[in-house]
Amino acid sequence: MQQNAITERHNNIAPIPFEADAPFLKIVGELPRELNGTLYRNGPNPQFDAPGAHWFVGDGMLHAFHLENGRASYRNRWVRTPKWLAEHDAGRALFGGFGRKLPDAPQNLTDGGVANTNIIFHAGKLLALEEAHLPTEIEPGTLATRGYHNYQGRVAGSFTAHPKVDPVTGEMLFFGYNAAGPLTPALSFGSIDASGKATRFERFEAPYASMVHDFIVTANHVLFPILPITGSMERAMSGRPPYAWEPDKGAYVGVMKRNGTAKDIVWFRAEACYVFHVMNAWEDDNRIIADVMQFEEAPLFSHPDGRPTDPEKSRARHCRWTFDLSGNTDRFQQTYLDDLTGEFPRIDDRRAGLKSRHGWYACANPRLPMFGALSGIVHVDGNGKRLGHYLLPAGDTISEPVFVERSSDAAEGDGWLLAVVWRARENRSDLAVFNATDIEAGPAALVQLGHRVPDGFHGNWVGAA
């Protein structure tokens, strides 16, 4: 009874109202001496309550765990976006959900960006990302906000929170949806070389306006999933949900050769589903294999008339998509690899776009709401078979696990898994460090915070220079 009461009474969604520095954190166990660098994490942490605001649109707050020679420190800062600065000066919320200004907001205020979804390091720059605006450059260490980064004016509009970095060339590929304006079916696509120079930027039309959170990149192809969380300006203007679940639209995935253009895209079809996150993808002769976390129905969004989606179907499971490039069919196959509820898949990023033998994701209790019950980690092989499974004490929750290789020449999967854990009974958070290939042994070390890190989205490790 007590365990159930803890789960029902508490969650870790609410924001924290402060910024903090903790230079010397308590460590339980022993941090590996080879772990030298910083885990940066990002997530929504609204500065002010706003009517009608969706969890997805809270102001971005960065959390940095710096590990060095067995010691650990922590710092958190809000990203000083134009929206955050304007609301801070006003002392109140000026925006509601998905960039919608409140009626009493100043007329000249137009930028509702929140920079709250991911944080990456590429070409010497640390970038906070969300999918409706350009990257926001962050000063490493201090977490000070430097402002939008537009690659010498060569990139404009929306920029995904999930760019893909080629482990061989260092090139970063990206896309953006709503590329012709809010709730439009246009997508953009581009690339940034290893030196940070934009080398490509183009736009094209998708089958319909969709929330396109992630995309797929292999050695020679780029795939764009258009799945039926649809965008509608008509709905938004009439006070109904701007984004809603419309399964009748079906699922499309556009396949383009990396050295081709948007004119060459071939559209594949399948039954309606939704995917927030891709684990990895690779080429296998004349096929493309993509492992994703697939929902039968989208969570966190309603039907256009406001009806909720089916909670039994609104949970993600590890699923394999297969595309036959021979031209024999325009359908792609969807094959579930496990029945376990999970999200936030990660791999050893040195195998991104190449066949991989290790993957990890946060798993959930299927009896509880999808994003409120991520309570363990699963380790899988390249075919989705479970290699290890670790569960937290009842009521505790876990973030996306981030892999850190032991060294640049270590074998795939040889390293550690870092994840932030919320301790429900104590209402505070730990940074848990696992041996990546032996997660069932539990954390090898815990870095203990005196406060909680709210449930967030994504993060990445940046090694010491």
Image (tube, rainbow, N blue to C red):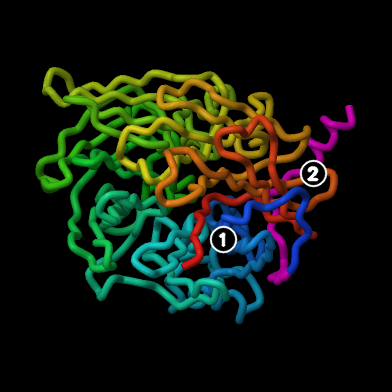
Specify whether residue 153 is in view. yes
**Picture quarter with the N terminus:** top right
User: Which mark is in front, 1 or 2?
Assistant: 1
State which quadrant residue 294 falls in. top left
Tell me which residue sits at (67%, 53%) in the image: 31
User: What residue range appears in magenta?
Assistant: 1-23
* Residue bearing mark 2: 424
* Residue bearing mark 1: 36
Q: Rate crowding at label 2 as few (under 14), some (14 to 19) or many (20 or more) other CA atoms within 10 Å.
A: many
What percent of the width, then of the height, locates residue 388? 59, 26
State which quadrant residue 10 falls in. top right
Q: Separation of disc 1 and disc 2 at Cα?
A: 29 Å
Helix, strand or loop for disc 1 = loop
Disc on res. 430: none
Question: Can residue 4 be found in the magenta stretch?
Answer: yes
- N-terminal-most mark, 1 or 2: 1
Question: Can residue 410 be found in the magenta stretch?
Answer: no
Tell me: residue 267, above or below residue 262.
Answer: above
Tell me: residue 389, above or below residue 57.
Answer: above
Q: Amino acid at mark 2?
A: Ala
What percent of the width, then of the height, locates residue 310? 55, 25
What percent of the width, then of the height, locates residue 98? 48, 56
Q: Amino acid at mark 1?
A: Asn
Residue at the right extreme? 2
Q: Is residue 276 left or right of residue 440?
A: left
